[in-house]
Image (cartoon, rainbow, N blue to C red):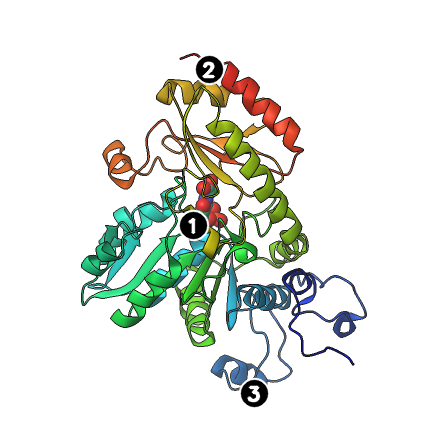
Amino acid sequence: MQNQKRPRGFSTRAIHEGYDPQDYHGALNPPVFLTSTFAFDSVETGAARFAGTEPGYIYSRVGNPTATVLESRLAALEEGEAALASSSGMGAITAVIWTLLKAGDAIVADKTLYGCTFALLQHQLERFGIVTRFADLTRPEELRAALCPQTRLVFTETPSNPNMRVIDIEATADICRKAGVLLAVDNTYCTPYLQRPIALGADIVLHSATKYLGGHGDLLAGAIVARKELIDQFRFTGIKELNGACISAMDAFLILRGLKTLSLRMDRHCETALKLARDLEAHPAVESVFYPGLDSHPQKELAARQMRGFGGMIGMELKGGLPAGRAFMNAVELATLAVSLGDAETLVQHPASMTHATYTPEERAQHGFTDGLVRLSVGLEDYEDIHADLIQALGRVSG
Ligand code: 4LM
């Protein structure tokens, strides 16, 4: 008996979904459609495509065949109806917010977010009459209290960048559904391999595809996954008319290439990061380690329920605070001192002066991370080599 009804596994979908070589001369990989525009065979066809009464491509800001393969694949991996790729993670986030909200509306966001997302919500949107209330979404009662009749969207990351707080997506989605508010989850840290927010009740999933989805530090891109009706709005209003942040065909191709090894890479990131988090926590120079797989993490049980693995990101505070953190980051040799995450190379950076310099010192304190916090994006090198590098760098920290 053929078992054709059995749904395909994650890795199989990451390699095959949305593309049949027979549609393109048997080419194993999807062609890269390096074209800005698409020829119509008649004025009537062009008009029908613009009117949406006939399918077909018009212009690559609105859709491109290489991007379509990527979008089908991402939708299948996130178990959503449809997806939209964009030129960066910030392009995806702004497309969602500018499409859904207008002056007078409000957003509730978790209190720790990637620095530019925070800057958008805290400092920029108010110029357009949109207000953001920050709440600790690890506490459902804080979310309920922050919602108001003007709230249209609840926005969260989980685990949060940079301090690895974990938000209960199912519980948050339940509150949002009852309040008639959409829930958007930035799934950059996990990828759909580790966590699928739509299956847990979220409405919108966002990605910086620059990170694990691409996986090789060679591009910037973003993605949105949601119901088709919402994706149509994000495509035809958000990207077509509001921010123009469309993906390039070449970047779509590179992400498709990265996705083929996503599950293998994520397994390795998770395995090495868990071991390193335990090593770092046991080191005498280390004050605390923030990693959801550690027994000391307050939401370890939730993380184990919600995520397939604990991910490749680690936050760490040293006993000597900021001076010790600086000395450590300057002492790494194999690890690279750089922002971004999810690459093959282990990256080390200082949130307070780099990715999260958009928070004032007071905001950082209020929003739950110290100036001494060091962030590690654990790469794919041999565990023994990363371990040796981090331990030698800790050995050069005085205090
Ligand atoms: C960084 N992050 O943390 P683009 N969502 C999350 C992110 O971490 C980022 C974005 C969105 C870092 C960049 C320098 C959770 C970015 C924004 O950079 O616009 O693709 O994604 O190091």
Residue that appears at 33% across and 45% down: 112
Disc 1 from disc 2: Cα separation:
33 Å
On residue 44, the disc is 3
Of 23 and 399, nearer the camera is 399
Q: Tell me where residue 57 sits by quadrant.
A: bottom right
Disc 3 from disc 1: Cα separation:
59 Å
The earlier-in-sequence mark between 1 and 2 is 1
Of 355 and 289, nearer the camera is 289
The number of callouts visible is 3
- Element on which disc 1 rests: helix
Q: Amino acid at mark 1?
A: Glu
- Element on which disc 2 rests: loop
What residue is pinned by disc 1?
Answer: 301
Farthest-out residue, top? 398
Q: Nearer the viewer, mark 1 or mark 2?
A: 1
User: Badge 1: how crowded within 10 Å, few (<14), some, or many (20+)?
Assistant: few
Q: Are marks 2 and 3 in contact (CB under 8 Å)?
A: no
Q: Is residue 131 visible?
A: no
Q: Nearer the viewer, mark 2 or mark 3?
A: 2
